[in-house]
Image (cartoon, rainbow, N blue to C red):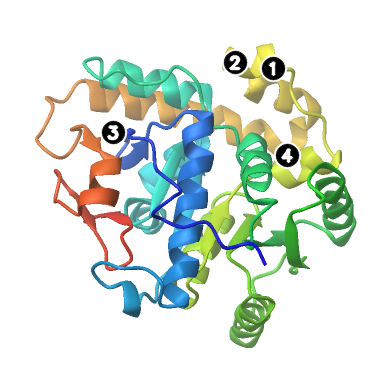
Amino acid sequence: MTAPPSSRTTSVTAAPVVECLGVPITAHTRDSAAGHVVHLAGRMREARHGLTDGPGASGTRRGSDVHLSNAYTLALADRDPELRGILRSASLNLPDGQPVVWANRLLHRSAALPGTRVYGPDLLTDVFALTQHTDLNHYLLGSTPQVLDALHRELRRRYPGARIVGTCSPPFRPLTVDERRQQVEEIRSAGADIVWVGLGTPKQDRRAAELCDALPVVAVAVGAAFDFIAGNKPQAPHWIRHNGLEWLFRLGCEPRRLWRRYLFGNARFVQGVVRQASRPLRTGGGALHPAADCLNSGQLVGQVRETPGGVPRVRP
């Protein structure tokens, strides 16, 4: 049996953490983001089996929630204290959207930040590629049964060695307490290490955080990646995504569903960036934090601290 990835062998590439609209964003590249997720999953798995050395290793309870934060997500968090608290307390927020990348480079000009985003579908497929010869288990949560079936088949085709231990298409209405409990137990019983949550923002962000409160897993709020990889919705060409125009492409595909989101969300995001840019840089608030130092050395850096599981958290 193949050994699970170890935090001692799966390294995390150093990446600065910067603040955008009150949310700490880890400025990973595509490759380093996937490696970070696998690293977190390996540490969680080791902690569950008592293999990890270091502070709190034997008593890790909470999982690690990972959020793909685009302009709309940050605009919502700017006006929603609950969502903002979830993102500020998250294990990892990634810049999913070229406008977020541009905003970070504008707001933190002295930092050498990457010029490209971490795209949700790329993150999912890259992590599958990295884990297909390991014992890390994947669970797919969200969308419709038809999309999940197509997604499952496509991932099996691309990554035959990957371990998908379960799928769940929850109802679109709010879950009852019993349904939430049952969902948690199904994920636990399946032995999932990484739970991919595709429920739409902000629902998926809340559910990822809830799952990590209940289970020692990595829960990734991955947006529309399920639909794109399954072929249920068209993806914007690379040049459109690279130039920050994916929102316009998606608006053209789904105008009735997305017009309000992009009209008001984009405007609020720009407003928030202008507001932040007009404020003087405060120590901690918009400072640069080396994320890998927090993961590997456990030292306090700015507002970022390490939790017992070795995961960087931000004080709300």
Local secondary structure at mark 3: strand
Kind of residue sitting beneath label 4:
Arg
Residue 138 visible in rendering: yes
Figure check: 68 above or below 268: below
Q: Label 3 is placed on what type of residue?
A: Val
Task: Please state, as top left, top right, bottom left or bottom right, where the N terminus lies in the image.
Answer: bottom right
Amino acid type of the residue that numbered disc 1 sits on in the rendered structure = His
Residue denoted by label 4: 257
Residue 69: image x %, image y %?
A: 48, 40
Secondary structure beneath label 2: helix
| Depth order, front residue of 74/2 | 2
Q: Label 2: which residue?
A: 242
**Among the two numbered marks 3 and 1 on one chain, the one whose residue lies closer to the N terminus:** 3
**Cα–Cα gap, marks 2 and 3:** 21 Å
Q: Earlier along the polypeptide chain: callout 2 or callout 3? A: 3
How far apart, in angstroms, are the residues tagged by discs 2 and 4?
Answer: 23 Å
Q: Are the residues flagged by discs 2 and 1 in contact, CB closer than 8 Å?
A: yes
